[in-house]
Amino acid sequence: MRYISSGHSHGEKISIIFEGVPANLEIDINDINSELSRRQSGYGRGGRMKIEHDEVKFTGGVIFSKTTGAPIAMEVINRDYNNHQTYMSPFDYDLENYKAVKVPRPGHADLVGLMKYEQNDTRVVFERASARETVSRVCVGAICKQILKQMDINVYSYVVNIGGVEVTHLDLKYINESPVRMPSLVKTKEAIELIDQVKLNKDTIGGICVVVAENIPAGIGSYVSHETKLDAKIAANIISIQACKGVEFGQGFALSNHLGSEVHDEIIYDHGFSRTSNNYGGFEGGMTTGMPLVIRAVFKPIPTLMQPLKSVNIDSKEVSPSHIERSDVCVIPAASVICEHVLNYEITKAICEQFTSDTMKQLVTALNDYRDYLKRF
Ligand code: EPS
């Protein structure tokens, strides 16, 4: 299973080719579109999300609503392209009224991208470095979610920290009501006030989200090689989400404050093996333990500030305020949805690699046989 995406933030569309999906999966396109709109929501997003209304279109790999086993082709139109067409059309552009972006933003891919690809307009870099690309991760993850549903595997997420406003007592029922996806009414109010204040100050804030996957059998992934460890693949994919600066499994960095005897998840047997705790977030030796996967990811404040930081003009080399674009203030609620879909993808990919997966029936049968085997172990 693999996918590749192409497209620019203000280009015509994001295109995705997704290969390795088992045949005969009935695709619910409304579910994919509602995942796309979850990605667009969240308090703290900027003006762009009022323009976009993301909807997926399938152009290959699905016939009579079902996957065929062939690569799936999808696209999502960027409505904002209409406002940028005069310079974002690859061949039919008009540069008369266009001004190249000469001052890179600190914290963004801008400067290093310019240097690496021998460019003289930052737009060439940020059009692709943009988090608009995460549309592709959601389309792919939403298809995987439909595969996982047939195996009773459920992935969800929530936000535990926005700019230092931290949730300590979880009220999970509240996640989907909270405009910032925080499982706490009190902390949601505090986070919203903080986002408003940060916006007034023309600044941005980051935060932490948690993503959880339930009902995954023990033994997905493998300890045998660095390339087969599933926790490593998940960490790499989550880190690749724009603005992510760290990933933890279970107690993560807090494990440094404990003795081994306090944190190793003790083994019990009661109609099958289980653990008395889940301090390692569902992984041992790069394999799932059968406990829920619990992963935390930290996202930096996004780089575009309405009150720009110091930078340098790439032509004149003079000190200049960095480029100002319309921007989001806080993207953590959207990032938590994107993390869910990255996890949907990595779990599905690992399961499809481990079991026979030409068709959905073969895959579900093989996984259920394996679950039966584990119960007898
Ligand atoms: C982004 C900047 C903003 C975001 C964009 C990612 O876009 P614009 O500069 O057009 O206002 O809204 O995210 C999306 C378009 C999206 O769909 O998530 C950036 O610089 O990464």
Image (spheres, helix red, strand yellow):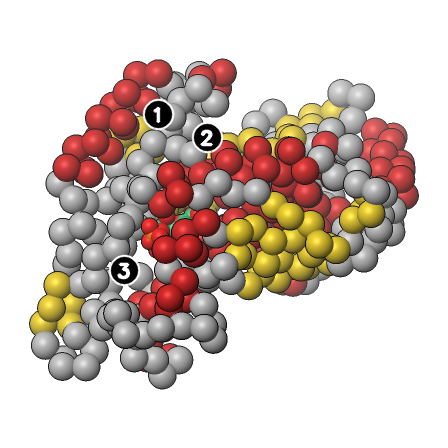
Position of residue 181 in the picture relative to residue 164 (left or right) = right
Position of residue 123 in the picture relative to residue 225 (left or right) = left
Position of residue 225 in the picture relative to residue 257 (left or right) = right
Q: Is residue 296 above or below residue 183?
A: below
Residue at the spot of label 1: 167
Q: Are marks 2 and 1 in contact (CB under 8 Å)?
A: yes
Q: Quadrant of residue 288?
A: top right
Q: Which one is in front, 202 or 76?
A: 76
Which percent across, then down, holds residue 132? 45, 53
Type of residue at label 1?
Val
The tag earlier along the polypeptide, 3 or 1, is 3
**Disc 3 or disc 1, which is closer to the eye?**
3
In the rendered structure, find residue 107 and report the number of the disc placed on it.
3
- The quadrant the N terminus occupies is bottom right
Cα gap from disc 3 to disc 2, whole angstroms: 25 Å
Which percent across, then down, holds residue 54? 52, 43
- The quadrant the C terminus occupies is top right
